[in-house]
Amino acid sequence: MRAVVELNRAELVTICAVVSAATIMGVEPAANPSEHAQLLQQGEASLRQRNLAQSDHDGMLMIARDTLALVATCAYPQRSLILHHLPSNGALLQAFGHKHADSVVFHEVLNPDAQRLQALGSLEDLARHVLDWCGYAGVAQTPLRFHIQSTVLAAARSLIERSEEQAALQALADSGVSAQAASVFIDMLSQNHTTSIFNAVVYQGQQVLSREYTLLQADDQALLMTQTNIEQDLYQLETTSRERLVSLLLQSLA
């Protein structure tokens, strides 16, 4: 399979039509039949110009095999990893990982009209690739773990954003968070930090199983946040390693 290809929206809409898919994640579908027809016309012309498409003996549009396989994997995934990454003081970045049969594809949204699709060897390659994509090298840290309700978490973050660190420290302490954990958490959010959200999705017939992880990073600190109790709206935050996060993503995609 061709290792990597960049495609614009019209090209992707055209290839989706060839594989009988409405669209793929990250690609805005046409708003109406008129726009769809226009995109198909533009996409076909562009694909032909780039030698990514040609006509068969019946005049039907044929897409280059490797490019077709990349898009088809994104259109009909059995496993997906949906990624959102917010750099400090930056615009939200979005990407996806998809697996169908033996095909694994990393799909990065470069901008609203440009997408990059890259073939990878395995889900493990995908898990490691997405950690590189969000800039997580993994660092040695003192083990730390605490639980917190989302309402307390939101209140603490709001206080930190207003530079009311002492009030945030008290709010966390009142909810049972240790002084050490609260100090680390407040220190991270008081400085430039990044937020990466990993949503692992497994499709089982009509059933969709989903597991979400949020990684907070600041300098040499990183905290992984997962929901541990839906009814109590309880979250766990803990230090983690690169290998453990890879393992968690693989388990969630198994």
Image (cartoon, rainbow, N blue to C red):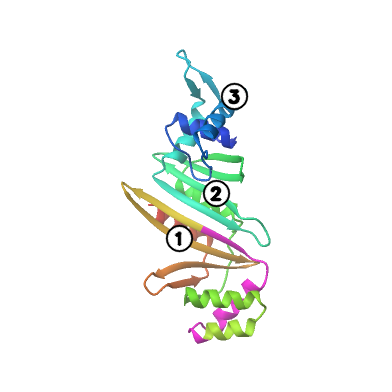
Crowding around mark 2 (Cα neighbors within 10 Å: few <14, some 14 to 19, many 20+) is many
Crowding around mark 3 (Cα neighbors within 10 Å: few <14, some 14 to 19, many 20+) is some
Is 246 located above or below residue 232 in the figure?
above
Residue 47 point in image, percent of width and height = 58, 26
Three-letter amino acid code of the residue under disc 1: Glu
Residue 17 point in image, percent of width and height = 46, 31
Viewer-proximal residue among 96 and 19: 19
Q: Which residue is mark 1?
A: 212
The part of the chain drawn in magenta is 174-197
Residue 41 sits inside the magenta stretch:
no
Question: Which of pointers 3 and 1 lies earlier in the amino acid sequence?
Answer: 3
100 sits left or right of 93 in the view: left
Quadrant in the rendering for residue 190: bottom right
Three-letter amino acid code of the residue under disc 3: Ala
Question: Which of pointers 2 and 1 lies earlier in the amino acid sequence?
Answer: 2
Q: Which residue is mark 2?
A: 95
Report, in whole angstroms, how far the alpha carbon at label 2 lies from the one at label 3.
26 Å
- Whether residues under marks 2 and 3 lie with C-beta atoms below 8 angstroms apart, the answer is no
Secondary structure at badge 3 equals: helix
Q: Residue at x 67, y 67 (%)?
A: 192
Q: Residue furthest top?
A: 57
Crowding around mark 1 (Cα neighbors within 10 Å: few <14, some 14 to 19, many 20+) is some
Q: Which residue is mark 3?
A: 45
Q: Is residue 144 visible?
A: no
Quadrant in the rendering for residue 215: bottom right
Is 239 located above or below residue 51 in the figure?
below
90 sits left or right of 63 in the view: right
Report, in whole angstroms, how far the alpha carbon at label 3 lies from the one at label 1.
40 Å
Three-letter amino acid code of the residue under disc 2: Ala
Question: Which of pointers 2 and 3 lies earlier in the amino acid sequence?
Answer: 3
